[in-house]
């Protein structure tokens, strides 16, 4: 893998000492609840103090962490179910990826984000309406500008039925959406999806972290997206061309900071929530992403590791020993979603505790007060330019 | 408070007592038993003869069984007749017992054929505990016995006698031993084992005369051959013991005719066990099925219904598990079908003494034989009982690894996960 | 009553349930000792049926309407205080009538122990059956489904 610096290692967060006392999360309440979606420009109330402003649909997260898109096909049904159940238990969301939604998973719809990607696999009205939010995938951090390819041997009966493609046929996602060549085109798709779901669900647009990400994000916000998901260059996948994976894209920290800054400058930050994705390896990465301006994060690889992934990098062979990246029934069985879900709940609960601990250390009792609060970060070993983009001071300053 | 009376004190009676007590804990239960014993395991009399079962093993229930269930036992007393109008049972001691609900569970009695010399000393039957005790007293090493009848009881007696050191000849009229539960192939394999244990088996023949002065000294067969012996055991069959119901309006065919609730045609009278003729789900006809499990189950159904329940007996069919000299066999239902509506598959492995056969009728299993490889045979029994359509796994049925894994998922889930079929 | 149910979707066919059943019913309760030293080695009360990719463990269902109890010719097979169907080895004569009767095929012959049956006893001395505790993929569950 490309040896670019993992920026998070150089962004120590500041801790309260003496003048700004820290908070003990074991004794005092700590709020991690996060609302994702467009916020109104202003709130209006009637003479009785009742809210008049019509609020746009929101995703409500108990913890600012979601499970990122991993399609049924690339991962097994039992892996999908582990994610779905854990999301439900945790009060967060998981993302279907571009593989459609298996009929047995509709019951987790309240905690499901349904993705619409360039291949439009498994996309139909019931699918869209079953979910809590919709996500248009434009790009993926591990392979910006590259399409997808699910080999025919993974397209067995269930995958074929879910994706609505013939059994055994390769599932090819084109690199671009063939109906999107401009922000206006994107706007059309966003509104088509809103129309199809009665304006009841927030729409997310997911893009890869690339150099002009800030300008693109601004366009996406203006196109009517409620949430922008930005996938950093270390985003995981079992199926990206090596040269692309190791050479294309920019670090997520830079992207988030740039986007947050730009949206704030344009006065439209409240119109859209920002989700950071790509290599959130631990709770400190999350703290840093949020301090740089993200509302929440997506995790994928960490989630898979929690349910048993050993990073043996055989995903593409379809012979995942742990029943995750495989469709072989004999292997899929190895992953009991009861166990998978429990481990995920365990992971997120542990991170939740850690996040609270760190917030307390900063003297903050609500995740909201951390969002975009770059004062909490200091850079070490970064150039002035990088620190400017990140909007942080150097350590010691 | 109801007065329950049960004539007989064996499997069917115990089933009835347990059945009654599932529903009624107050009614009085009186059991009339000609045999002066607590219920014992009748099939174990051959073990008793062979010396491998003691009193403890023979006892069918714990010592406290009758007391715990509030049963008054009239042991060593015979019921001689039934007055169905005054609802009382007349006993051999002159007394009478009145009933509200009566169960006739008198079992079977040996059929002893009329033969010349049949009144001599040294001729035995092999049905009761006392028979086994009597036989044990004379079955000394070196003595000789002729067993008339190569059925279950005859061969069990023969095995017991051989274990006592007796020199045994079995005479069977049919062309094979165990003709009700085995076909030719299986019978031949079992016969080989019996002969290997020095039992002399004579087929297609019978005893026409017992010779000797006062006591038996030999028999003469139909083919003229004579065989020396010190004792003769007649085991050519057991008939339903319907004596007590004779001269009443209780309807009797071969046994006492009962409906699916084990009710006889006369109100408040039930029959169960070897004495009853109930519906056989395999033959789809009324039949006497003289086997222990049927006796218990019929008794239980009768008991529950006597106590006011409404349950049907729907599992009547022949099935046997038996071993001779360590060779186990389990058979059930129709094992030698006649007619072209049947389909048969079988596997023979002579070196391992394995024989397996399945009989189907319109995609249902209606019978099987399993010799030596008897493991999990109950699955097949269950398929017969539940009248399952076996077509999806017919070809696997006799395989060594046959199990639920070959059955349709829905059926498997229902059976194994307790998920009820709609 | 609590019973063991197998989730065939998650059974990987490793047969650790069988192994741990044997260990739990051994004298030593030690896996090495039970398999290498003890004679006779207890038969597992659970058996794994497998035709890839389907596999699942199956042991006595402890039926409410137990055919084996009704059929047993000696009264050896009975229901204990816990509701579990168990065989009294002192009374069993090894006639295998229960094998003929059990519709699940869960009773085994234990000829090493002098012709008595061997079957699941739901591990009376353990908080839950050993097969359930030792299934690495939680494909056996111990729950009350009536
Ligand atoms: C040697 C032998 C081996 C067997 N082996 C097997 C086997 O391995 N498996 C199997 O399934 N079956 C076997 N059977 C058959 C099984 O024993 C019978 O099916 C079972 O005993 C029937 O039970 P029952 O309650 O109907 O009657 P029985 O057991 O026949 O009992 C009837 C009782 O009623 C008593 N009685 C009869 N008339 C009167 C009366 N008028 N007044 C009072 N008491 C009366 C009799 O004395 C007897 O005690 C075997 C039988 C024998 C003899
Ligand atoms: S041994 Fe078989 S018949 Fe008996 S209780 Fe267990 S599963 Fe039921
Ligand atoms: S083998 Fe034992 S437990 Fe089974 S029916 Fe025979 S005596 Fe009863």
Image (spheres, rainbow, N blue to C red):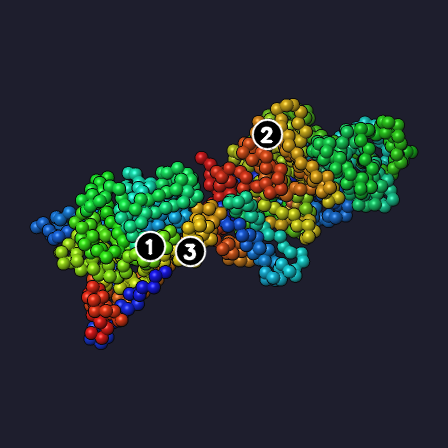
**Horizontal arrangement in the rendering, residue A277 relative to residue C63 (left or right):** left
Q: Are marks 3 and 1 in contact (CB under 8 Å)?
A: no
Q: Which residue is mark 1?
A: A244
Mark 1 vs mark 2, foreground winner is 1
As drawn, the residue found furthest toward the front would be A243
Q: Which residue is mark 3?
A: A313
> In 3D space, how far apart are the residues under numbered discs 1 and 2 (Cα atoms)?
71 Å
Q: CA distance from mark 3 to mark 1?
A: 16 Å
Above or below, A275 against B379 in this view is below
Q: Position of residue A111 (x, y in %)?
A: 31, 49
What's the residue at 23%, 52% (across, down)? A228
* Corner quadrant of residue A339: bottom left
* Quadrant, the N terminus of chain B: top right
CB of mark 3 within 8 Å of CB of mark 2? no
**Circle 2 sits on which residue?**
B281
Location of residue A167 (image quadrant): top left
Identify the residue shown where x is 44% and y is 43%.
A153
Disc 1 secondary structure class:
helix
Which callout, 3 or 1, points at the residue further toward the start of the chain?
1
Label 1 marks a residue whose chain is A
């Amino acid at each position: 893998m490309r040896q670019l610096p993992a920026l998070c290692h150089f962004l120590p967060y500041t801790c309260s000492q003496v003048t700004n006392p820290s908070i003990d999360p074991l004794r005092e309440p700590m709020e991690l609840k996060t609302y994702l979606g467009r916020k109104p420009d202003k709130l209006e109330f009637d003479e009785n103090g009742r809210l008049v402003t019509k609020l746009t649909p929101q995703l409500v997260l108990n913890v600012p962490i979601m499970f990122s898109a991993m399609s049924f096909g690339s991962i097994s049904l039992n892996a999908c179910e582990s994610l779905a159940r854990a999301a439900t238990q945790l009060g967060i969301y998981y993302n279907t990826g571009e593989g459609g939604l298996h009929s047995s998973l509709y019951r987790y719809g309240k905690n499901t984000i349904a993705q619409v990607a360039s291949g439009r696999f498994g996309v139909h009205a019931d699918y869209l309406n079953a979910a809590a939010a919709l996500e248009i995938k434009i790009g993926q951090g591990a392979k910006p500008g590259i399409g997808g390819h699910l080999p025919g041997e993974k397209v067995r009966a269930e995958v074929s039925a879910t994706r609505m493609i013939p059994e055994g046929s390769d599932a090819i996602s084109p690199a671009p959406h063939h109906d999107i060549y401009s922000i206006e085109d994107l706007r059309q798709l966003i509104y088509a999806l809103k129309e199809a779901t009665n304006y009841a669900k927030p729409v997310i647009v997911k893009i890869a972290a690339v150099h002009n990400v800030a300008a693109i994000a601004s366009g996406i916000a203006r196109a009517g997206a409620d949430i922008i998901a930005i996938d950093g260059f270390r985003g995981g996948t079992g199926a990206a061309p090596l040269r692309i994976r190791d050479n294309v894209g920019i670090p997520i920290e830079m992207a988030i900071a740039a986007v947050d800054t730009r949206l704030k400058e344009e006065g439209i930050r409240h119109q859209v929530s920002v989700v950071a994705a790509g290599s959130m390896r631990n709770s400190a990465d999350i703290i840093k992403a949020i301090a740089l301006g993200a509302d929440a994060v997506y995790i994928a690889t960490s989630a898979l590791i929690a349910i048993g992934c050993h990073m043996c990098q055989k995903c593409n062979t379809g012979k995942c020993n742990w029943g995750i990246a495989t469709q072989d029934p004999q292997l899929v069985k190895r992953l009991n979603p009861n166990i998978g879900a429990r481990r995920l709940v365990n992971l997120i609960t542990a991170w939740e505790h850690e996040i609270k601990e760190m917030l307390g250390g900063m003297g903050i009792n609500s995740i909201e007060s951390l969002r975009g609060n770059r004062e909490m970060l200091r850079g070490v070993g970064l150039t002035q330019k990088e620190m400017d983009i990140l909007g942080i001071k150097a350590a010691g300053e | 408070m109801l007065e329950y009376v049960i004539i007989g004190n064996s499997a069917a009676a115990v089933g009835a007592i347990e059945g009654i007590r599932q529903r009624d804990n107050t009614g009085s239960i009186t059991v009339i038993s000609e045999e002066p014993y607590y219920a014992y395991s009748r099939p174990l009399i051959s073990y008793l003869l062979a010396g491998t079962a003691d009193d403890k093993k023979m006892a069918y229930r714990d010592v406290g069984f009758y007391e715990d269930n509030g049963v008054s036992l009239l042991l060593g007393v015979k019921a001689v007749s039934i007055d169905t109008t005054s609802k009382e049972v007349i006993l051999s001691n002159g007394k009478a017992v009145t009933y509200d609900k009566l169960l006739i569970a008198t079992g079977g009695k040996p059929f002893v054929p009329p033969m010349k010399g049949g009144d001599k000393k040294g001729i035995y039957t092999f049905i009761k505990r006392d028979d086994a005790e009597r036989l044990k007293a004379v079955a000394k090493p070196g003595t000789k016995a002729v067993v008339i009848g190569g059925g279950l009881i005859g061969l069990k007696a023969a095995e017991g006698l051989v274990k006592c050191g007796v020199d045994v000849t079995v005479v069977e009229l049919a062309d094979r031993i165990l003709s009700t539960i085995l076909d030719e192939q299986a019978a031949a394999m079992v016969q080989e084992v019996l002969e290997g244990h020095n039992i002399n088996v004579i087929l297609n023949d019978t005893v026409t005369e017992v010779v000797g002065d006062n006591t038996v000294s030999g028999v003469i067969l139909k083919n003229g051959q004579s065989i020396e012996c010190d004792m003769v055991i007649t085991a050519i069959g057991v008939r339903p013991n319907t004596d007590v119901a004779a001269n009443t309006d209780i309807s009797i065919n071969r046994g006492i005719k009962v409906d699916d609730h084990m009710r006889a045609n006369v109100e408040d009278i039930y029959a169960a066990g070897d004495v009853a003729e109930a519906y056989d789900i395999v033959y789809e006809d009324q039949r006497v099925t003289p086997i222990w499990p049927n006796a218990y189950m019929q008794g239980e159904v009768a008991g529950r219904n006597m106590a006011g329940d409404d349950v049907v007996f729907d599992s009547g069919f022949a099935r046997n598990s038996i071993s001779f000299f360590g060779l186990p066999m389990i058979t059930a239902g129709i094992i030698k079908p006649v007619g072209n509506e049947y389909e048969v598959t079988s596997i023979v492995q002579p070196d391992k003494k394995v024989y397996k056969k399945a009989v189907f009728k319109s995609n249902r299993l209606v019978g099987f034989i399993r010799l030596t490889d008897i493991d999990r045979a109950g699955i097949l029994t269950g398929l017969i009982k539940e009248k399952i359509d076996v077509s999806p796994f017919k070809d696997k049925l006799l395989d060594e690894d046959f199990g639920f894994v070959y059955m349709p998922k829905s059926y498997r889930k229902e059976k194994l996960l307790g998920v009820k079929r709609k | 009553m609590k019973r063991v149910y197998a989730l065939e979707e998650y059974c990987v066919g490793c047969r650790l349930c069988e192994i741990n059943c044997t260990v739990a019913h051994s004298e030593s309760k030690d896996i090495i000792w039970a398999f290498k030293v003890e004679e006779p080695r207890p038969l597992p009360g659970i058996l794994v049926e497998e035709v890839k990719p389907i596999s699942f463990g199956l042991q006595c269902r402890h039926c409410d309407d137990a055919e084996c109890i009704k059929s047993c010719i000696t009264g050896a097979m009975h229901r204990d205080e816990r509701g579990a169907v168990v065989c009294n080895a002192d009374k069993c004569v090894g006639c295998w009538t229960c094998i003929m009767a059990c519709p699940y095929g869960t009773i085994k012959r234990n000829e090493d122990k002098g012709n008595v049956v061997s079957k699941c006893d739901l591990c009376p001395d353990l908080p839950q059956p050993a097969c359930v505790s030792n299934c690495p993929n939680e494909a056996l569950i111990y729950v009350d489904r009536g």
